[in-house]
Image: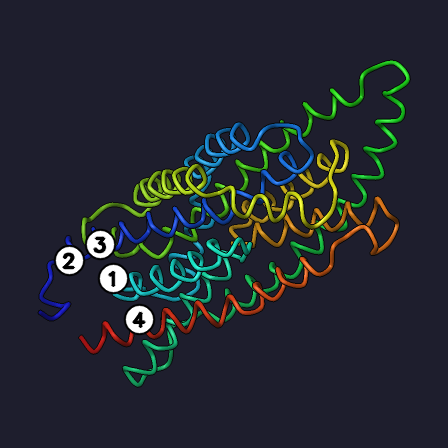
Amino acid sequence: MAVESISPEILVGIGLLLAFYVAFNLGGNDAANPTNMVVGSGALSLKKTVVLFTLFAFLGAYFQGYHVIKTLGKGVVKDIDLIMAISASLGAGLWVTIATRKGLPVSTTHSTVGAIVGVGLMHGYLLGISPKIDWNVVGKVVLSWITSPLGAMILASILYVFFLWSSNMLSRKYNAVSIFRVLLIATMAFSAYAYGANDVGNATGVYVSVVSSVFGVPDVKTMHLLSVLGGLGIMTGALLWGYRVIMTIGFKITRLDYVSGTAAELANASVVYLFTLMGMPVSTTHASVSSVIGVGMAKEKGFSGVDWRIVSLIIAGWVFTLPIAAGLAAGIYSLLYII
């Protein structure tokens, strides 16, 4: 049976199931980004941290997820059709699944953008036309991938120095450890909110146009519904297997305490939230890992405070993510095109 003989409504349903699958993988892989500092410093148990993360990540997706959904759904590739959307979801989702099973914190943003670009290029090649890719938007997205980790690393280092000074001042009259434990948990909640707002578009953004056209739903309402779907998927993935990557980032890059954890968490959250308001799908993994590296270097006043072997493995995952996701999505699209 040819794909074109299946009703659009059924295909959209299949696509939305795939969107949920991608969101599930996002929750599993990216739950570490806002939570690793809390778990790594011992402020909360792994179970309590993941539950708190799921709540605030869903709120972020629900209230402000539309910012990035708009960019990924209508910015990178113009007029994404249903088969292109399904192919992009499968390509990105498969790679994130593989990485998560290995405990490797890859960028789901890189996976999604790579998959969309791969599908767009293959679409143009198969039809013998110029790809409908807005390279200006792609350029801005790639630039944000460079500036966000650098910004997170620098901000985390500055915040650590300030918070360390504040802790020493507070210790003369108050229990500074308890104060910073509460601050760390509060900044984690903000970080989870920022994460949900930014990353939900990775799972659902490609379906804005197709859902709107097939069901006649306005774009604004479509983005809201997709935010809910993606938020539920992120919650489920985080609860069921988010612990794998949390253990990698929380304990293996550098040793965290309440002060360093708070500095890294606030830097991560601030950078991600800023780029979310700009509609840029930054890598929350980049921002999170870079924040941890920043405090590690500030603590030891140099490079010795970071386990660079673990960092190099993570960076390798980042480098290979975009071409792998693009290749998978392009291959899936060409197969469906032939069918």
Label 1: few (<14), some or many (≥20) within 10 Å?
many
Structural distance between the alpha carbons of marks 2 and 3: 10 Å
Vertically, is 99 above or below 16? below
Of circles 2 and 3, the one toward us is 3
Residue type, numbered disc 4: Ile
Please report the residue visible at 64 percent of the width from the left and 43 percent of the height from the top. 250
Q: Are marks 1 and 2 in contact (CB under 8 Å)?
A: yes
Of circles 4 and 2, the one toward us is 4
- The residue at which mark 4 appears reads as 332
- The residue at which mark 1 appears reads as 82
In terms of depth relative to the viewer, which is nearer, 100 or 315?
100
- In which quadrant of the rendered image does the N terminus lie? bottom left
- Dot 2 lies on which element? helix
Task: Give left or right: position of 52 versus 87.
Answer: right
Please report the residue visible at 32 percent of the width from the left and 76 percent of the height from the top. 123
Instruction: Give the mark nearer the N terminus: 1 vs 2.
Output: 2
Residue 279 placement (x, y as % from top left): 51, 51
Instruction: Give the mark nearer the N terminus: 4 vs 2.
Output: 2
- Dot 4 lies on which element? helix
- The residue at which mark 3 appears reads as 14
Residue type, numbered disc 2: Pro
The quarter holding residue 91 reads bottom left
Label 4: few (<14), some or many (≥20) within 10 Å?
many
Structural distance between the alpha carbons of marks 1 and 3: 10 Å
Task: Give left or right: position of 18 versus 197.
Answer: left
Residue 309 placement (x, y as % from top left): 70, 61
- The residue at which mark 2 appears reads as 8
Please report the residue visible at 41 percent of the width from the left and 50 percent of the height from the top. 25
